[in-house]
Image: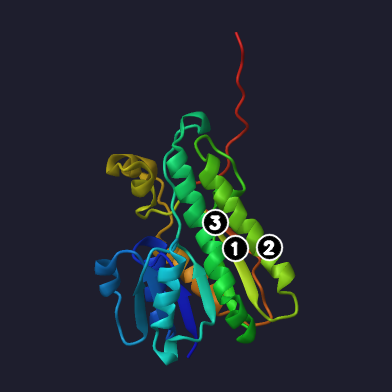
Amino acid sequence: MPTALITGATAGIGEACVHAFADAGWNVVATGRREDRLAKLQRDNVRTLAFDIRDEAARDAALDSLPEDFRGIDLLVNNAGLALGLEPAQQASLANWKTMIDTNVVALASITHKLLPMLVERKGAIINLSSVAANYPYPGGNVYAATKAFVRQLSLDLRADLHGTGVRVTSIEPGMVETEFTLVRTGSQETSDKLYGGVNPMTAEDIAETILWVATLPPHLNINTLELMPVNQSWQGFAVHREG
């Protein structure tokens, strides 16, 4: 039975991934900070680990506590991440910028580095959650979008370095998915409702099923990048400022 380690499993896409993979017969290691939410995910083929993804010592201690039949990781789903604030760069909080970088970039790179030897040994896979923000700039995206561009580029460069190992790497790049994401970013349920209202956005389950599909493709196939949007979302034209 293959084992998937899914970060950021206490809500949204991560939580949906836990259910999708467990229902498909995988062993799942679900990680996150909120123990009360992790407790609700427990089942025979799911083990939960509570730690802050930015805390390497806590992460390592948690991984060391896994029972033997959950220690062999075949798939790393790097889902943990967040966006904070929508202000233009010149008005943004430096603390928010650092939190996003530490979570979306440093912590993701760190757990990937930690598990790479095992993934190479087991000819496993890495699926990273990037975003359409990695490809399309927008006002207020600044550091959040930059962190997702890092995730996308790291995925591509991992593919180059892992050439010949059998390890697959994919960057999943969703557009509008209605989860807690915007609520966390803005702190406002009203803002979240307004953003998604009438859009018929994607759901966490949509993305989780896509990730499961990627993970269960034949081992000689690799999806390098996969961009997804709801039908009602597309690209905008260039912004033009006119003087006078």
Can residue 104 be seen?
A: yes
Asked if disc 3 and disc 2 are in contact, CB closer than 8 Å, the reply is no
Q: Going 45% across and 49% down the picture, which residue do you hit?
A: 99
Q: Going 63% across and 86% down the picture, which residue do you hit?
A: 121
Query: What is the quadrant of residue 190 in the picture?
Result: top left
Residue 70 x/y as whole percent: 43, 86
Residue 208 x/y as whole percent: 45, 68
The C terminus sits in image quarter: top right
Asked if disc 1 and disc 2 are in contact, CB closer than 8 Å, the reply is yes
Residue on which the image places disc 3: 105
**In the drawing, does residue 197 fall left or right of residue 59?**
left
Q: Residue furthest top?
A: 244
In this rendering, the label closer to the viewer, 3 or 2: 3
Q: Earlier in the sequence, mark 1 or mark 2?
A: 2
Mark drawn on residue 171: 1
Total numbered circles: 3
**In the drawing, does residue 103 fall left or right of residue 48?**
right
Mark 1 surroundings within 10 Å by alpha-carbon count, few (fewer than 14), some (14 through 19), many (20 or more): many
Q: Classify mark 1: helix, strand or loop.
A: strand
* Residue type of the residue flagged with mark 2: Leu
Q: Earlier in the sequence, mark 3 or mark 2?
A: 3
Q: Earlier in the sequence, mark 1 or mark 3?
A: 3
How far apart are the alpha carbons under marks 1 and 3? 14 Å
Residue 46 x/y as whole percent: 36, 81
Q: Classify mark 2: helix, strand or loop.
A: helix
Can residue 175 be seen?
A: no
Mark 2 surroundings within 10 Å by alpha-carbon count, few (fewer than 14), some (14 through 19), many (20 or more): some
**Viewer-side residue, 59 vs 217:** 59
Residue on which the image places disc 2: 156
* Residue type of the residue flagged with mark 1: Ser
Q: Going 55% across and 38% down the picture, which residue do you hit?
A: 138
